Image (cartoon, grey):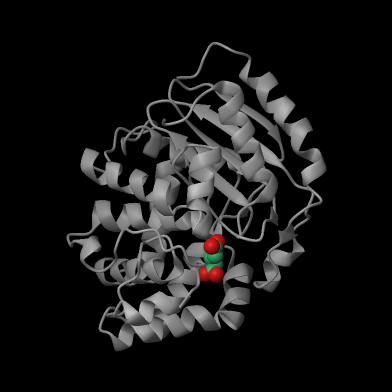
Amino acid sequence: MLKNQDLQAVLEEINEEVQPLLSEGTVADYIPELAKVKQDKFGIHLLTLDDRSYSVGDCDERFSIQSISKVFMLAMAVGECRQNVYDRVNVEPSGDPFNSLVQLEYEQGIPRNPFINAGALVITDILLSNFPNARNEFIQYVNSLAGLKSINYNNAVAASEKKCGFKNAAMVNLMKSFGNIDNSVEDVLDLYFDFCSVEMSCQELAKAFRVFANHGKGLVDTRRYLTESQYKRIAAIMQTCGFYDEAGEFAFKVGLPGKSGVGGGIAAILPNEYSVVVWSPGLNEKGNSLAGMKALELFTTKTQTSIF
Ligand code: GLU
């Protein structure tokens, strides 16, 4: 539980401590549009369930949420579609890079979990089959979670990824050959790249993730986005699969369920207490924000909070 301490001062201390790390790591450039982001950006936003918020740095600047979007995709598929999502995607950590094709072949086209690309592509296929206009309905869903209206796709980022998304195309094709993709390969890829291109700030992501910290119940509205059991499962997948093949390290150092993206964002929750989002575009060799991971480690250490 958050102690009665000066949380703004904690964030400011962390901001100072991570400054030397901002030049380390590498900004993702395999999607050319992402390489344009300045490496020295850093922001954190903390939002508690009882409506206190604290921020530092570039926490109002929107960035490409990339794989953090996979949490929204899964929540929408599980909460809004009448079909068992987990028949088509497993829930085990992969221990392989997010875009690996190897496991997919010997596991007959069933992805290890919904937070690696293959899994998120199956979820995209499910959303495409269940909504007449999944692209519009998804962005409305994300806006609704955050209690906002202005969150949107970045078409330039989606187009840039489309031009070089060969591995994702290979995955969808492979899964289609195993019968685990219903729609056309092209439609699934286009929608997936759009989902990854959503732009949000730390502050906006913290608002959306606070719903997960609140067990899937809206705070701005009173909507129940997820049942208790649906929430529990998604939080468990965040904990075990949210950080590529570094989920163990993140649990060890930070101790919060969460999800990272190659845009340098990390969104995490302490159920019943808070959501916290950090952004720093320099990535470590596993694809997680280098300074972001350190910042969250410092945060849970200084506040003595974690799920454990
Ligand atoms: N759109 C990215 C991809 O599929 C997402 C990567 C990520 O953030 O993990 O490669």
Q: Is residue 127 left or right of residue 151?
A: left
Residue at 66 percent of width and 22 percent of height: 10
Q: Is residue 263 above or below residue 191?
A: above
Q: Is residue 230 above or below residue 100?
A: above
Image coordinates for residue 147, horizontal then vertical, percent: 44, 39
Quarter of the rendering occupied by the N terminus:
top left
Image coordinates for residue 297, horizontal then vertical, percent: 60, 36
Residue at 30 percent of width and 79 percent of height: 181
Image coordinates for residue 31, horizontal then vertical, percent: 65, 72
Q: Is residue 140 left or right of residue 304?
A: left
The answer to whether one can see residue 140 in this image is no
Residue at 54 percent of width and 37 percent of height: 254
The answer to whether one can see residue 264 in this image is yes
Residue that lies at the very extreme toward the top in this rendered image: 4
160 or 179, nearer to the observer? 179
Quarter of the image where one finds residue 257: top left
Ligand 1 appears in which quadrant? bottom right
Q: Is residue 73 above or below residue 126?
A: above
Quarter of the image where one finds residue 92: bottom left
Label count reads 0
Image coordinates for residue 121, horizontal then vertical, percent: 39, 71
207 or 90, nearer to the observer? 90
Quarter of the rendering occupied by the C terminus:
top left
